[in-house]
Image (cartoon, rainbow, N blue to C red):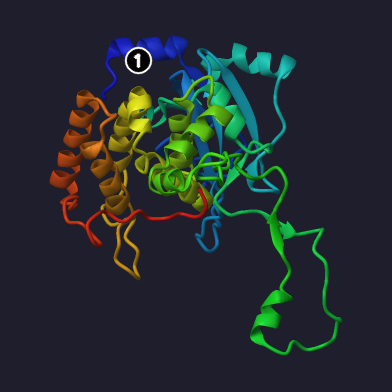
Amino acid sequence: MEMNQETALRLFEEGAFFILLDVTVGTEFGIDYNSWQVGEKFKGVKMIPEGVHFVSYNSVSRKHKEAAPKLGFFHYFHSKEVLVRRWDKQLESISEDVIEGEELANFESSLKDLDRFLGPYPYDNYKKWKSLTNHITESLMTRLEPASGRISSATELVRDGEEKVCYTVGDLPKSMKEAEGRLPKMVAVAGTEIRFVTLPTRAYPEGASPADITKYSMDKSFVLEELLSAHYAENHMDLLGELQFAFVCFMVGQVFDAFEHWKKLVHLLCSCDEALGRHEDLYSAFISTMHFQLREIPEDFFVDIVSCNNFLTTTLQVFFYNLANSDAASRQLKKRGNQFKDHLTKIFRWDFETEQDDDAPVVVQLGET
């Protein structure tokens, strides 16, 4: 999407500003899907479109040319907003101190003087970014981001303070298993975890008959309904927002735990039958969300190097099978799903027709759901 003069003028007048002071030259700085190495004159980004954005950065060792783990944060930029942060040279990170009040007002009144030090938001990639984040609302972003407000590609760990020592210090372990059991139990530093929802552990209704237990062991619609009512009762599309949030965190923020959560949500949505009829709008939007996400993923990204199984082809095969054979899904949703399947077959040459075991597609289990 190229920026014409009219769009440039509108963004200049209505766009937001992110001012970053004192950042070390050579630092890798990024916003959304774009990143650069900072030069001497860099002081931030201007003309940022209103909405959710992800700011990321890595300090880079001048001596060894090695980058530190990526850090970042989400921020919902409002029209004409001016966000000012400082670089902490000692921590090699953006300071958590908030610049506000009179100091912020001074920056707001001197934007013209700062203009030549601010890079324009790379609007060419904005359409792609918007398609990957259109379901992330400001309230959902606030709910999901870590309490610390910072997302790190490297999990920050500390020793579990509640861990009990069950051996005499000085005694040698009698086996490898015992030695491994003595290793300290590490947990994430409080406030650093992304606050993803926990999927329900019960797969069927309380008091279910043996027939229903069998049914819901295959059809995950009960789990989906429980998840929607517990966390997304006001807006079911927020589930797709969380899916997008996880996708950005692992594709841009390089957070492995977000990748695992993304897979669990995709697996759940693809493993439902009854829900296809109850939530047509959700599933229609899910197909669009997956369409745009898969455009950003290398073809062999999900291939297990041991089994050579592709998570996506296996999981989407279940989805397409359920959709094609569903009595609940509408004709329009089935058509949309079939078009998506044909598109993936053409682009990636993925085979969704060959059944993998016995007479039906295999459902890939990703932990308890």
Any part of residue 254 in sight: no
Any part of residue 305 in sight: yes
Q: Is residue 190 above or below residue 111?
A: below
Left or right of residue 160, residue 92 in this image: left
Q: Nearer the viewer, residue 164 or 131?
A: 164
Q: Nearer the viewer, residue 19 or 211?
A: 211
> Tag 1: Cα neighbours inside 10 Å, few (<14), some, or many (≥20)?
some
Q: Is residue 64 above or below residue 290?
A: below
Determine which quarter of the picture holds residue 346: top left
Q: Nearer the viewer, residue 240 or 92?
A: 240
- Which residue sits at x=31%, y=56%? 362
Residue 184, position in %: x, y? 73, 69
- Which residue sits at x=52%, y=13%? 80
- Which residue sits at x=24%, y=42%? 320
For label 1, the SS is helix
Determine which quarter of the picture holds residue 104: top right
Residue 188, position in %: x, y? 68, 53
- Which residue sits at x=58%, y=30%? 230
Q: Amino acid at mark 1?
A: Ala
> Would you name the residue on which mark 1 appears?
8
